[in-house]
Image (cartoon, grey):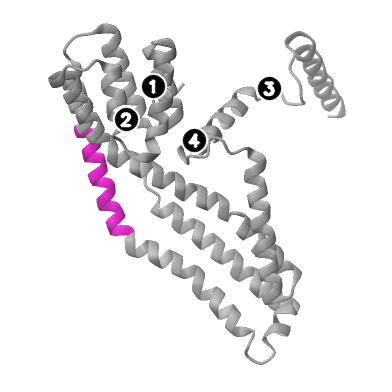
Amino acid sequence: MIALLVAAIAGYGVHLLYTAGLLGWTGLGPAPKLTTTKRQRRTSNEWMTQAGLGAVAPGEFLLASGAMFLLGALVALALFGALIPMLAAGAFAASFPIAAYRQRRRNRLSIAQDAWPRMIEELRLLTSSVGRSLPQALFEVGAAGPEIMRPSFAAAQREWMLTTDFEKTLRVLRDQLADPTCDATCETLLIAHELGGTGIDRRLADLAQDRRDDVAYRKDVRARQSGVRFARRFVLLVPLGMAAAGLAVGNGRSAYTTPIGQLAVLSALVMMAGCWRWAGRMLRLPTEERVFAR
């Protein structure tokens, strides 16, 4: 048994030396994780771009989380006067920037989803009835679109003015918006620009109708979820209010500092965070994948 173990270790050592010398692999794993790392980095960058925070550095994000951790820890220390609840509350508060960025991302994607059916329809009319060229129609539609989308169209227009390369122009727009509907629209426009023909009118009409159906479905679901979302926020306020009221009842503050009190507070905070997370996952609507993303 020992001989087999030694042989396995020696064989793995030879594998590490061979791959390091010949292939340049590093680390103790059997293969590099560059693909996973690149995919995670791309997903993170796409997530921040969709939230409108593409220019925010990771250090700034960590700084915001650290500030919220400190604030939550100080509030818990003032309420409970104990170390364990302070750390738990600080960790819970540190997740607030992530939740805020997620909400910002959802709002931006919702605005884009509501606007794209109208924009695609206007694009279809400009290219078919009015006779605009595809780049000109795209920029006119973008200039009249929602405020949060106009900088992306302006960046794409600058690229077009500098290079007159429609593919690069659409790539800039797709990278700036990071939106599945934008990907599908840009891919349709690129094919029409390269191949020509009259089929673009029908394709854009079908795409606009599909987007309208998706928007109607999402609005109906959000309307049904409105009461549940309010109750989810209310769950946070009630326990915190009861904990603050307990400070004024008898020896409430000293009770929080006992081992049993700290365990009870920690359990309550963990249950609050778990219920908040669970309810959020249950209320989450399915998001479209970027099929044409690079």
Q: Toward which corner of the image does residue 76 lie, by quadrant?
A: bottom right
Q: Quadrant of the N terminus?
A: top right
The residue most toward the left is: 129
Residue type, numbered disc 2: Gly
Q: Which residue is mark 4?
A: 49
**Which residue is depicted at the point 36% across and 40% down?**
147
Q: Which amino acid type corresponds to the residue marked 3 in the rendered image?
A: Pro
Q: Which residues are magenta?
A: 209-225
Residue mark closest to the camera, 1 vs 4:
1
Mark 1 and mark 2 in contact? Answer it, CB < 8 Å.
Answer: yes
Q: Are marks 3 and 1 in contact (CB under 8 Å)?
A: no
Rendered image: mark on residue 277: none
The residue to which callout 3 is attached is 32
User: Please, what secondary structure does the residue beneath circle 4 have?
Assistant: helix
- Camera-nearest label, 3 or 2: 2
Query: Element under label 3?
Result: loop
Residue at the spot of label 2: 142
Residues at marks 3 and 1, CA–CA distance in whole angstroms: 40 Å
Query: Residue lying farthest bottom?
Result: 250
The answer to which quarter of the image holds residue 139 is top left
Q: Which residue is mark 1?
A: 157
User: Horizontal and vertical percent for residue 13?
Assistant: 82, 20
Residue at the image position 54 percent from the left and 66 percent from the top: 272
Residue type at mark 4 is Thr
Other-residue count near label 1 (Cα within 10 Å), few / some / many at <14 / 14–19 / ≥20: many
